[in-house]
Image (spheres, rainbow, N blue to C red):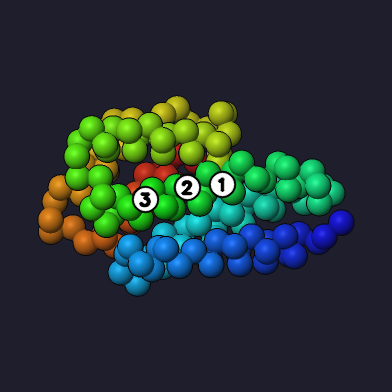
Amino acid sequence: MADINSRINKVVGEISGNEALLEMLDADAATELLNWGIATATMLVKKTEGMDDAAAEQALEPQLKAVRQTMRSAGNWASGKYADPAARAQLRDKLNEYLKTIHGEGGKPSLVDRMNIVLNQVDDKNRTPLQLIQSFKGLIEESQ
């Protein structure tokens, strides 16, 4: 059985290796999103303390996948790839599903109205990708 720190280091390495974020966002926005991903993944891994490796991996796999998908979707959104309101509605639905997977069905109910407001901030050309990611991160933290 691997100790919890080994599991955390492995997962942090996987999350940190996401070079696609640096390609789609400026360094500050990518760092903000990466820090959220690392903190969230670390929190999830800590919940597996005491589990054997196979059980921990099985428990973590869908949650960590949802963290990566959330990061990728948020990065694409902040870089302007969801300019169409219909596409943002689909994004909102996907993000709600990812957050349920990450935090469990017992988390707060869907934040659909608040998520719509945050996702529509991409239309404000005065908002930087970093500001968009910070708004998104705040929304996610509300859902926990």
Residue 129 at what x, y percent from top left?
Answer: 26, 60
Residue 71 at what x, y percent from top left?
Answer: 44, 53
Residue 136 at what x, y percent from top left?
Answer: 34, 49
| Residue lying farthest to the bottom in this orientation | 27
Question: N-terminal of the two: label 3 or label 2?
Answer: 2
Graded by Cα atoms within 10 Å as few (under 14), some (14 to 19) or many (20 or more), the crowding at tag 3 reads: many
Badge 1 vs badge 3, beta-carbon distance below 8 Å: no
Badge 1 vs badge 2, beta-carbon distance below 8 Å: yes
Which picture quadrant has residue 78?
bottom left
Q: Amino acid at mark 3?
A: Ala
97 versus 20 height, above or below: above
| Residue lying farthest to the right in this orientation | 1
Residue drawn at the location 59% of the way across and 49% of the way down? 64
Residue drawn at the location 38% of the way across and 48% of the way down? 73
Give the secondary structure at mark 3. Answer: helix
Give the secondary structure at mark 2. Answer: helix
Q: CA distance from mark 1 to mark 2?
A: 6 Å
97 versus 139 height, above or below: above
Residue that carries the numbered disc 2 in the rendered image:
69
Residue that carries the numbered disc 1 in the rendered image:
65
Q: Amino acid at mark 2?
A: Gln
Q: CA distance from mark 3 to mark 2?
A: 8 Å
Which picture quadrant has residue 26?
bottom left
Q: How many marks?
A: 3
Graded by Cα atoms within 10 Å as few (under 14), some (14 to 19) or many (20 or more), the crowding at tag 1 reads: some
Residue 60 in the figure: left or right of residue 115: right
Q: CA distance from mark 1 to mark 3?
A: 14 Å
Residue drawn at the location 21% of the way across and 61% of the way down? 128
**The N terminus sits in image quarter:** bottom right
Residue drawn at the location 73% of the way across and 48% of the way down? 57
Residue that carries the numbered disc 3 in the rendered image:
74
Residue 77 in the figure: left or right of residue 65: left
